[in-house]
Amino acid sequence: MAEVEIIVAHHERATLRVGDVFLKVDTDQARADAEVAAMALAPVPTPEIRWRKPPVLALAALPGRELGRPGTPSTASPAAWAAAGAAARKLHDAPLPPSPGWDPDELAADLDRECAWLIANDVLPADLVTRNRQIAQAALRPWTPVFTHGDLQVAHIFVQDDEVTGILDWSEAAQGDALFDLAALTLAHQEHLPDVLAGYGTEVDLDVLRAWWSLRGLRVVCWLAGHGFDPAPEVAILKTLLF
């Protein structure tokens, strides 16, 4: 009999693995609908949908292993990281999805609220929040929207033999800034940025990408703290961005 493995669980959603099937339980059916729609549109490998009975979505397990994990060194090869960059470029070149995503003004207002919360609740030192907020400002400029994954972190990309076998968790997919995805991919593994950019195949504004590191770091710490997870690895990253 297959064992049940809890992959992630919090008050909004949970993901379980039973044998070769992942079961995603999401309390927000609109978000689940958006995820299914985004997977159908994405021009990159995604998990096969085995069945769906709200609030549960059953997905086939992907071959290979995750590109990495936040907070731990990645054992994936430079070629695998380049393949992830190439997959991101293929996604960004695709027709836009229907969801409009954030615009810079909305994102700036949301970030200011979250920074205020981090300081008011003593989650992070005020000077660390303030300086990273200043760095993040460079990302809040008009951008040409592309098809973004929205949470393209290393744990959501599976690779095998230096090829991407699939990308998970499309619930945040929307129109957005391409550099947001690249920042999410490299935030916890900045040493692999050259490999990712080699696979991506075009020049990017590194100052803006670094600004997205600060912006995403601040917002991820807030989310982690609010959902009972340890934000220590992300806090360490925010500290390194000041130097």
Image: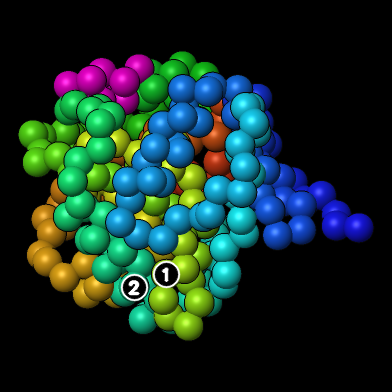
Q: Nearer the viewer, residue 149 or 128?
A: 149
In the rendered view, tell whether residue 162 sits above or below residue 31.
below
| Element at label 1 | strand
Give the image location of residue 227, x and y in percent: 60, 29
Q: Amino acid at mark 2?
A: Ala
Give the image location of residue 198, x and y in percent: 22, 74
Asked if residue 128 shows in the view, the reply is no
| Residue appearing at x 29%, y 36% in the figure | 174
Q: Nearer the viewer, residue 129 or 175?
A: 175
Task: Give the quadrant of the C terminus.
Answer: bottom left
State the image quarter where residue 134 is shown: top left
Category of crowding for the residue at label 2, using alpha-carbon neighbours closer than 10 angstroms: few (below 14), some (14–19), many (at least 20)? many
State the image quarter where residue 77 is shown: bottom left
Would you say residue 157 sits in the magenta stretch? Answer: no
| Residue appearing at x 42%, y 69% in the figure | 164
| Residue appearing at x 62%, y 27% in the figure | 54
Q: Nearer the viewer, residue 137 or 223?
A: 223
| Element at label 2 | helix
Q: What stretch of residues is rendered in magenta?
A: 105-113
Q: Magenta part mainly helix, strand or loop?
A: helix
Asked if residue 160 shows in the view, the reply is yes
Mark 2–mark 1 Cα distance, whole angstroms, equals 6 Å
Task: Give the quadrant of the N terminus.
Answer: bottom right
Give the image location of residue 230, x and y in percent: 62, 41
In the rendered view, tell whether residue 231 sits above or below residue 153.
above
Q: Amino acid at mark 1?
A: Val
Category of crowding for the residue at label 1, using alpha-carbon neighbours closer than 10 angstroms: few (below 14), some (14–19), many (at least 20)? many
Mark 2 — residue? 83
Instruction: Tell whether label 1 touches label 2 (CB within 8 Å).
Output: yes
Mark 1 — residue? 164
Would you say residue 111 sits in the magenta stretch? Answer: yes
Q: Does residue 224 appear left or right of residue 111 in this picture? A: right
